[in-house]
Image (cartoon, rainbow, N blue to C red):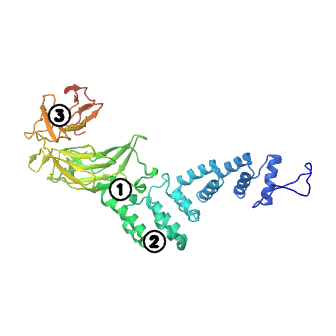
Amino acid sequence: VARSPRDSSRSGEKLELAMSNLTADVLELLLEFVYTGSLIIDSANAKTLLEAASKFQFHTFCKVCVSFLEKQLTASNCLGILAMAEAMQCTELYNMAKAYALQIFPEVANQEEILNISKDDFISYMSNDSLNTKAEELVYETVIKWIKKDAAIRAQYAAELLAVVRLPFIHPSYLLNVVDNEELIKSSEACRDLVNEAKRYHMLPHARQEMQTPRTRPRLSAGVAEVIVLVGGRQMIGMNQRALTAVTCLNPQNNKWYPLASLPFYDREFFSVVSAGDNIYLSGGMESGVTLADVWCYMSLLDNWNLVSRMTVPRCRHNSLVYDGKIYTIGGVGVAGNVDHVERYDTITNQWETIAPLPKAVHSAAATVCGGKIYVFGGVNEAGRAAGVLQSYIPQTNSWSFIESPMIDNKYAPAVTLNGFIFILGGAYARATTIYDPEKGNIKAGPNMNHSRQFC
């Protein structure tokens, strides 16, 4: 705004306003809105009107334009509107456009607009944890398309752009057959380093806790949640039973069941399953009469099973549990009968370590952790009868102790810890429960369950 020198009297003062990039049509609409309160807005002039209204600080006018543009958001224009809203510091429109663009990423990825946005805007969009994609492969493909849109200039940013892809969540076969063979990747050492990082993540599941980077963090659309997982089991077919390979999970948040990757074997039974961190470990078992030492790890973020280091002793009908981040496999039936052997697995080093043996060799016992100790209740002894013994282990001293009690007659039952007490549930098709107080050393009968069960 400038004062005209042609008239210095205050009553005749004139003001001049420089208005660049403002067409006569837009100015006419602005003036009409000022004098009449009416506004003609459509998809052709909405952006220009918003820019003008923002420049003149016509707040009511801005709200009308924002409301209109929010209703006009599509996969083909949302990124452009997002960039405009950010440049104009229009928070309401920015938040709306951003949420919309993130939610419909699969549609946005197929539009020409995404290939024309700036590098910084592209990285900001593609690296967002809320980017809604069921397959990280689509993120990778979109990055490659963006680079190839103007490869002469954009190829220099290949590593920076590839870093926004969560490569560890790309399927191994796609990683090897597609990503590995992409010329943009092959010609960049930094890109190859990122791909090799993802390969190591796939090849060394036991060491993944040490490989945490922004690329190993799942996007929110991955649907990561605390779930209850059912692994295998048996199914009655007529008068016969068949081992199941199905693995399913229940999401308590929506009370729905979902299928997971099936077991990687058939007709295996009497294995033990335990969760450690975000993964599930399945150890031992028997298949076609052969007792096994295999250990499989289910990677929840990748939905697949991988072999890890084998136990030192084959076993079935054993117990497995987690204490201080390590997996313990306890007792069971070996090649020549009951075993007292106990070993623990380090998920970081992928190594098994033999520790002090059980005082009494048992299988099909109930085991749990409580108060810094490992407890093994009952089970079946070498004579095939209920062992009637409680065995406890102190990891810090690598020592076992045991007591015998007629109250401990369980077999084929699980044990769980709750509020400092240990509950033994059913077993041998019983409804009975047993409650143990580790602090006082008391054992007592608990209330009967509604249904009898074993191997639950």
Labels 1 and 3 touching (C-beta < 8 A):
no
Q: Badge 1 is on which residue? A: 211
**SS of the residue at dot 3?**
loop
Residue at x 50%, y 54% (from the top left corner): 128
* Res 404 label: none
Distance of label 1 from label 3 (alpha carbons)? 42 Å
Count of marks overlaid on the render: 3
Q: Secondary structure at mark 2?
A: helix
Q: Is residue 215 left or right of residue 382?
A: right
Looking at the image, residue 417 sits to the left or right of residue 365; the answer is right
Disc on the earlier residue, 2 or 1: 2
Pinpoint residue 281: horizontal percent, then vertical percent. Answer: 27, 49
Amino acid under disc 1: Met
For the residues bearing labels 2 and 3, Cβ distance under 8 angstroms: no
Amino acid, disc 3: Asn
| Residue annotated with mark 2 | 184
Q: Which residue is mark 3?
A: 410
Q: Is residue 272 above or below residue 447?
A: below
Position in image of residue 374 (x %, y %): 21, 38
Residue 178 shows in the view: no
Neighbor class of circle 3 (other Cα within 10 Å; few <14, some 14-19, many 20+) is many
Earlier sequence position, callout 2 versus callout 3? 2
Nearest to viewer (mark 2 / mark 1): 1
The one nearer the camera, 380 or 183, is 183
Mark 1, secondary structure of its residue: loop
Image spot of residue 377 (x, y percent): 18, 35
Q: Amino acid at mark 2?
A: Leu
- The residue located at (30%, 50%) in the rendering is 246
Gap between marks 2 and 3, in whole Å? 62 Å
Q: In this rendering, does residue 351 appear at all?
A: yes
The one nearer the camera, 238 or 8, is: 8
